[in-house]
Amino acid sequence: AEQGREDEINTCIACNQACLDHTFKGLTASCLVNPFACHETQLVETPASAVKSIAVVGAGPAGLAAATTAARRGHKVTLFDSAEEIGGQFNMAKRVPGKEEFYQTLRYFKRQLELTKVDTRLNTRVSAEELLEGKFDTVILATGVSPRKLKLPGFDHKKVVSYIDVLKHNVEVGKRVAIIGAGGIGFDIAEFITHDPSHVKSSESVDAFAKEWGIDQSNSVRGGVDGVAPSLPTLGPREAVYLLQRKASKHGNGLGKTTGWIHRTVLKNKGVSMIGGCQYDKVDDEGLHLTVTAKKGGEAEKRVLAVDTVIVCAGQDPLRELEAGLVAGGVVVHRV
């Protein structure tokens, strides 16, 4: 920053996943966006002993890190992506309230591509044949994932959309919404669709944060919180939101150790209904039909959620269609 190179700073995204979460689990602390942190003697970037021609397919965070690291070591790197901008699924995640720092990660990698002189080819869906014709010594596949589709009657109903439809394609979401899947993406979608765009985000304003969590910034009361009522958020433009999962365990059980409770609390305060033990039966004009078993060995209950939109966040499948053709062509392939 002192040298005017602040655009080369890999900004913290405040995820806590590799620093505080690791610390409280008794693991080595590090950083999700800078894995060299606390591994400086193990992850050492040395000049390559032999310069190779390397193709990296996919300009999400994994592909960007692979491309710029290889280029810094002296390799000749070509980066391909079918999208018009770098970032992959980070471009969807950055739209979620509380994840605004993701813009800074992409700013950092954009600058690193310039500094390392990576040959970046966007709007290019490269094929295995084209990669073979390029005579690359090594191909690194960072092609990401696609949303997993549910196999149930009515999956093709007009009410059913994926999280990508919502975050990337801006599909219209109804007033009453069911979200299938309560992992990290399900929580993000719930946060995204319940945010009132006319309100200042608490993640971008100290005053809004203090108001939402009941904090007296003048510290005139004990601890700055005693007797201060929080201004609870609402469902925003929605009338009802259901966050559903197959497991009967606590929602968000796999979220970060130091942040999961925050996400659960925010959605609870907004009035999001969290239902576990769900079996998804069908989708029709009435809505989403469920069989709910609240606890193991408990009685099953048939329910119909009268929703306008069903957003599927039920996991992802890796995209690996390029790999077989490249391996058959004798190219060294690495997956990240």
Image (cartoon, rainbow, N blue to C red):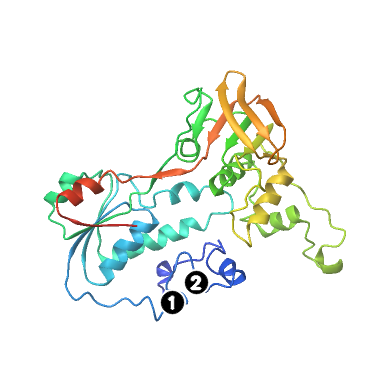
* Residue kind at label 2, given as amino acid type: Ser
Q: Nearer the viewer, residue 298 or 160?
A: 298
The label shown at residue 30 is 2
* Residue kind at label 1, given as amino acid type: His
- Residue furthest to the front in view is 297
Kind of element beneath mark 1: loop
Say which quarter of the image contains residue 19. Answer: bottom right
Say which quarter of the image contains residue 22. Answer: bottom right
Identify which residue is drawn at 43% across, 76% down.
Answer: 39
Q: Is residue 71 something one can see in this rendering? A: yes
Asked if labels 1 and 2 touch by Cβ distance under 8 angstroms, the answer is yes
Q: Nearer the viewer, residue 141 or 90?
A: 141
Q: Nearer the viewer, residue 201 or 62?
A: 62
Q: Position of residue 325 (x, y in %)?
A: 19, 46
Instruction: For the N terminus, give its image quadrant.
Output: bottom left
Residue located beneath label 1 in the image: 39
Horizontal arrangement in the rendering, residue 107 relative to residue 307 (left or right)? left
Identify which residue is drawn at 61% across, 23% down.
Answer: 287
